Amino acid sequence: MPINDDFDNRFDLREFTPAADADGVPDDRTAAWMQAVGMGFHEGNPTPEVLARIAGNMIADQETLLGVHVREPLPGSVDETWPAGTFTWFRKALSWGDGTGIDTQAISAVTVRPTERRRGILRAMMTHALRRGVEDGYAVASLTASEGTIYRRFGFGCAIRERAVSVRRNRALPFLAPTSGTVSVVPLAWLADRVGQDVFARFDARTPGSMVRNVATWPVVFGELTGDGEPAKDVRAAVHRAEGSDDVDGYVTWRVKESGSDTSVEIVDLVYATDEAYLSLWEFLLSIDLNDVVRYNRSRLDDPIVAALGDNRAYDVDHEEDHVWLRVLDVVATLESRPYAVDGSLVLAVSDTLGFAAGTYRLEVVDGRGTVTRLADEAGDAVDVALDVADLGALLIGSVDPVTLAAAGLVWASDPAVVVRLRAMLLPARTPHGITYF
């Protein structure tokens, strides 16, 4: 469906799946789409080997690609072959932290050429994709954003935030309580031979907000490749085992970098199936000689390391930003899929300018599971909570407090006690922690 006549006259929106030949060489439209994405994210020109690897990963992840092409490109411009706008989506499961989850329509590689800004390209791609998501039965769409101001207008709310932190090792140890188990350094190839993926599967099952990883993620976190797809040379790995056990329940990969006057241990990936593994791996990193600070760019907001440190002023927050954004497409299916901490009942009125989730719904939770009933429009007098679909997405995992959103004027409640009840219902067993980018 065209967004407007100007868009339809100027642009052609094309949906396709990535393809490559028997040698892995992407076909022309897939290669052109990848080149446009690289330009949008200021990436270098990929080698044929890197292009083939990226195409193979997209095929393995079963991505659906969108390209918006200029109908009458100027001679000599990249518009003759490259799309002016790019977009992709694929299936990615979101964990509720109790062993259950929900499949999301994961959106990525969103770019618009600067020459074609403010012509409706992003809106055309997003509305087309979300309609396709509804047709394909997705209840939720998801994304991680490179900019924080783009996606709310399409109904996405920030459900998880994360922090980049640094810990000064000369003031960090000893921890206030002893750690347990054994940490050992291991070859990267050994970790990559299913050991690391098995640990991530356990982390994912117990962690609200965790999402399964793309195929391309594993070689990077296991130190085989850099983010640019080139061979990595400086990554090492260690694993944790519980006392008296041979089973690995946590791992870390890291590199050592010179940064200004400091030498730092930079965590590449830190995955833990138990709290004991997390603490012990941090203690190990802080024990590495000939460095000044340990840096981690994916810390959760209530990081237990702060409480564990001998001097909590050794811990600094360098940066905090949005991470996982969620967009509810089917309120009933979404709210019935997740667990709840306490039983209760309330009526929610959801507004949605795109229309997918708009309506009034009764949520009744019994024995930790919810039943959702869509009510007639005239049920307005019974509404307990009214909110935009973006704020429903923000609240969904339990990382964002509805009391806070009410204080910000984003959630209306018939009584202040209602948002307190909603907070108690949504409270997750563990703090949401997303360590997957896409």
Image (spheres, grey):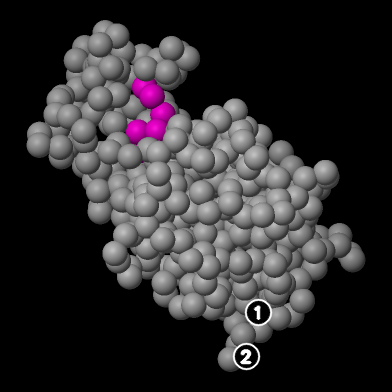
Of marks 1 and 2, which one's residue comes earlier in the chain?
2
In the figure, residue 253 lies in which quadrant?
Answer: bottom right
Residue at the extreme bottom: 22
Q: Which residue is mark 1?
A: 52
Real-space Cα separation, disc 1 to disc 2, in angstroms: 8 Å
- State yes or no: residue 182 in magenta: no
Tell me whether the residue at label 1 lies in contact with that at label 2, contact meaning CB atoms closer than 8 angstroms.
yes
Residue 321's label in the rendered image is: none
Q: Nearer the viewer, residue 271 or 146?
A: 271
Residue type (three-letter) at the residue carrying disc 1: Ala
Helix, strand or loop status at disc 2: loop
Badge 2 crowding class, 10 Å Cα cut-off, few under 14, some 14 to 19, many 20 or more, is: few
Q: Nearer the viewer, residue 292 or 57?
A: 292
In the shown orientation, is residue 249 left or right of residue 379? right
In the figure, residue 178 lies in which quadrant?
Answer: top left
Identified at 29% across, 31% down, the residue is 427
Q: Look at the image and give the residue range highlighted in magenta.
A: 396-402
In the figure, residue 397 lies in which quadrant?
Answer: top left
Residue 404 position, x and y percent, is 42, 18
Residue 435 position, x and y percent, is 49, 51
